[in-house]
Amino acid sequence: MSKIDPTARIEDGAVIGDGVSIGPYCIVGSNVKIGPDCKLHAHVNIGGYTTLGAGCAVFPFASLGMAPQDLGYRDEPTTLDIGEGCIIRESVTMNVGTVKGGGKTRVGKRGFFMAYSHIGHDCLVGDNVIFANSATLGGHCEIGDFVYFGGLSAAHQFVRIGHQAMIGGVSGLRHDVIPYGLASGQFAHLEGMNVVGMRRRGFTHSRLKVVRDFYQQLFHGGGIFAERLEALRPMGSADTAIAEILTFIDNGIKRPLCMAHNNPNKPSERAHLEQR
């Protein structure tokens, strides 16, 4: 049986799973679906066409599924899908998608979203991510699995952050960050590989060496970036992480690629075009 505080407002049509706990003064809209064993602590607002996966915990003043911050939105029935096992702390905001952006904002499983973090409209967020306090995504961002996003950091709309990348605190991301990359700075640049995270995910010493050698040659080698990229393509067969990085670079369309700070090819539109 679900436990619903008498001060909560559950609109007709909302679907509440077994074992759900809804605390004082929560508001759940008519098009919301809450999976089993979720807990809404108090003063939680869930609206729009929002689906909350099983076993999620949502803390006070979080606002999920409200209209996107997009002037072109006209109350279309777009959606927000949140995977199972997410922890959504105080005052977190996640918006539904827009028609022009595909109509869906998607958040993966087992994410940890600390206070005041924000997921903009049409974002696609992977599994097992951690967003520290006030980490912010503009619209249409794509975030891979196991990404750590530092506190008070923000990503420009359409930015992609690859699998298992780490973004340092108080960083501003205008460019795509490669899988396994470590980026930070007011105008963020690559500082290397997320070695600590890679070790935690089971990378051996020998495997780390192969991937780091590839990184050094790609971002710190001689000549222009496009030439280095083509020369290093055969290394994709040496490790799946390298293949993933190469595919990520090839799939870039909207934003330039985040480059190393001391690389002679500055992180500009020109560098982005050279790699194509």
Image: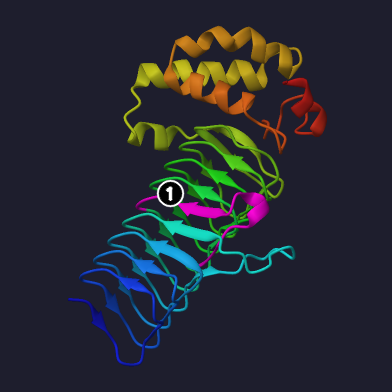
User: Going 59% across and 19% down the picture, which residue do you hit?
Assistant: 216
- The foreground one among 157 and 190 is 157
Q: Quadrant of residue 120?
A: bottom right
Magenta region: 93-110
User: Going 37% across and 67% down the picture, which residue do you hit?
Assistant: 33
Q: Which residue is mark 1?
A: 129
- Percent across and percent down for residue 2 are 22, 77
- Total numbered badges shown on the rendered structure: 1
- Percent across and percent down for residue 93 are 53, 67
Query: Which quadrant is the N terminus positioned in?
Result: bottom left
Q: Quadrant of residue 121?
A: bottom right
In-image side of 10 versus 124 (left or right)? left
- The foreground one among 233 and 27 is 27
Was residue 95 drawn as part of the magenta stretch in this picture? yes
Residue 265 seen by the camera: no
User: Relative to 58, does residue 27 appear above or below in the rendering?
Assistant: below
For label 1, count other residues whose C-alpha is less than 10 Å away and answer few (under 14), some (14-19) or many (20+): many
